[in-house]
Every structure is written in C-alpha cells, then in structure tokens.
Amino acid sequence: MRLFFLLIFICIFSYAKTINAIALTVNKEAITKYEIQKLMQDRRISKQEAINELINEKLELAEIEKYRIFANEYEIEDEMNKMLSQSGSSISAMKVRLNPSDFQKAKNKFKTQLEKRKLYEALLGGFKVDTSDQGAKNYYENHRDEFMLFTKISADVLTSSNDRELETYRRGGIRSKSIKSQRVVLSPENSDIRLLAFLSRIKENESTSIMQNGDIFVSYRVIAKSNAEYFQFEQIKNEVKNVYANRQRDEYLSDYFDKLRVKAEIKYLR
C-alpha cells in the first residue's frame, strides 16, 4: 500500500514538473508549457498563436521596464473608476461582487494594461501622423468597405453575469446556463447609428468583444447584414481621418515590435 501511494505521488510530481516545464525563453525570460496551454484554452487559439502572444507580452514587459513605465495606485484606481463608470459601476461595487483574491487579480491585470498603454504613448511620442485631407482621401479610396454601413443587421445579443463564461462561449465553447441569447434585427429605426456602424465592421458568424453594461456583460454575434450604404468622403471626412491615423499608429507599433522580435534571443527548449 505504501508503495502504491509512493507511485501516485511520483506520477503527480512528474506531471506537475511537465506542465510547469520551461518551453522557451525570450531574452532569458521563461515561458512555461502551462502558460501556453492555459492561453490556448482560455482564448481558444492555436499553440503557435499562444506562443506568439506570450513572446509579444515578454517584449512589452521588457520595454516597460526599459522605459521605467509605472502606474501608481492613484492612477490605477482613477482609470478603473472612469472605465467602470461608463457601465454604471465602480471600484466599490466591483469589490462587493468579487472576492479579495479575484479583485486583486483584476486590479493587477488593469495595472498591466495601463502600463502598456503608457508605453505605447511613449513610443508614439516622436511618431508623426499624416493628418492631411489628401492622405485621408487616398486611404478612403483604397478601403471603401471599411466605411460601408449596413442598415439591416440580424444579430444574436448574448448576455451573461459571468464574463469568463461568455468569453468561452463567444470563442466557440460550451454555452453555460448564465448565458442568455436573443435574436434581433437592428436598423436605423430601432438602433443607434453608432452601433450599426460598429456591427457593420464585424464579419457574419463572428462576435464582438465583450462589453459591460452595469453588472451584465454583452456580446453581439452577427448573423446577417444587408442594405449596404456608402458614404461620400466629405460626409465622413473626420471619421476617415481618425481611422487613418489609428491605422498609421498600429502599423508603427507593429513594425516596432517586429524589429524587437528579430533582435530578441528566443530559445525553444521543448
């Protein structure tokens, strides 16, 4: 009997070592097999996609340290309150809803996101964006579909009090009892034009990211779109300029981290 329990202990210990084994290092910073598997499961993405995201995260954290980016407690709570107030909530309400451990995890996650945002702002500080009318018009002519508005959109409105369960279902997982679904047909007569414009960018049979409305989390799954309308450039010039400017910034940051990745010392161990 003692031998039996010893064998079980050895098996458990070996399994724990396996899932916590280092899969690769990025500039000597470790990424474990467990981290890869967990991200694959949570995000329902491939192994290579998970590895790429974790490598990028290591590079971002290294840049945060390099540029001495830091978010203090006041900044974190102030930004959290601003974000939560948009959905009618607050840090106090969040503390009531979550246990202390989960609240601290949420706060730490927000701290990281805030520091990443400050990093991007610092990196973009010396980047000059083309804000000319001609540049925006050229972008519009080459990306007209980005500015098409569907005035009839059939969608499933997915709601839940549990954002994790909703995220799992949104990515093709099992639907839990907390998730409710309602099929709606949206049009200018019954919906905000900004919502229609937002959903017009979502492909059919795909879902939006999760949004929060008070204590309820919401995601739209687009089923079908019809009655497309195109706006003339002069009608939406300011919107086009915003999209064009954001695309330039995104491409600059993407190129910046691609170059970092080429220079990084990445070693695959398993």
Image (cartoon, rainbow, N blue to C red):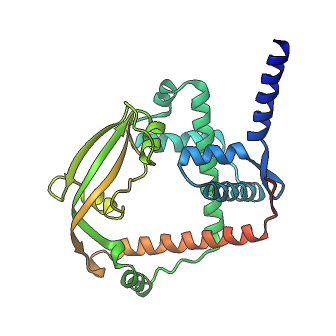
Task: State the residue at coordinates (63%, 54%).
Answer: 47
Answer left or right for 257 relative to 90.
right
Task: State the residue at coordinates (82%, 23%).
Answer: 7
Q: Quadrant of residue 78?
A: top right
Relative to 232, does residue 61 appear above or below in the rendering? above
Is residue 263 shown to the viewer in this render? yes
Task: State the residue at coordinates (50%, 33%).
Answer: 91
- Image mark count: 0
Relative to 204, does residue 88 appear above or below in the rendering? above
Q: State the image coordinates of residue 11 (x, y, percent, origin top left).
A: 78, 29
Relative to 248, does residue 29 appear above or below in the rendering? above
Q: Nearer the viewer, residue 103 or 184?
A: 184
In the rendered view of the protein, which quadrant contains the N terminus? top right
Q: State the image coordinates of residue 224 (x, y, percent, origin top left).
A: 26, 60
Q: Residue lying farthest left?
A: 189
Answer left or right for 147 relative to 85.
left
Task: State the residue at coordinates (42%, 82%).
Answer: 139
Q: Quadrant of residue 217?
A: top left
Is residue 75 shown to the viewer in this render? no
Q: Quadrant of residue 12?
A: top right
Q: Nearer the viewer, residue 29 or 110?
A: 29
Answer left or right for 191 relative to 29.
left
Q: State the image coordinates of residue 225 (x, y, percent, origin top left).
A: 25, 63
Q: Nearer the viewer, residue 234 or 148?
A: 148
Q: State the image coordinates of residue 89 (x, y, percent, origin top left).
A: 42, 35
Q: Nearer the viewer, residue 14 or 163?
A: 14
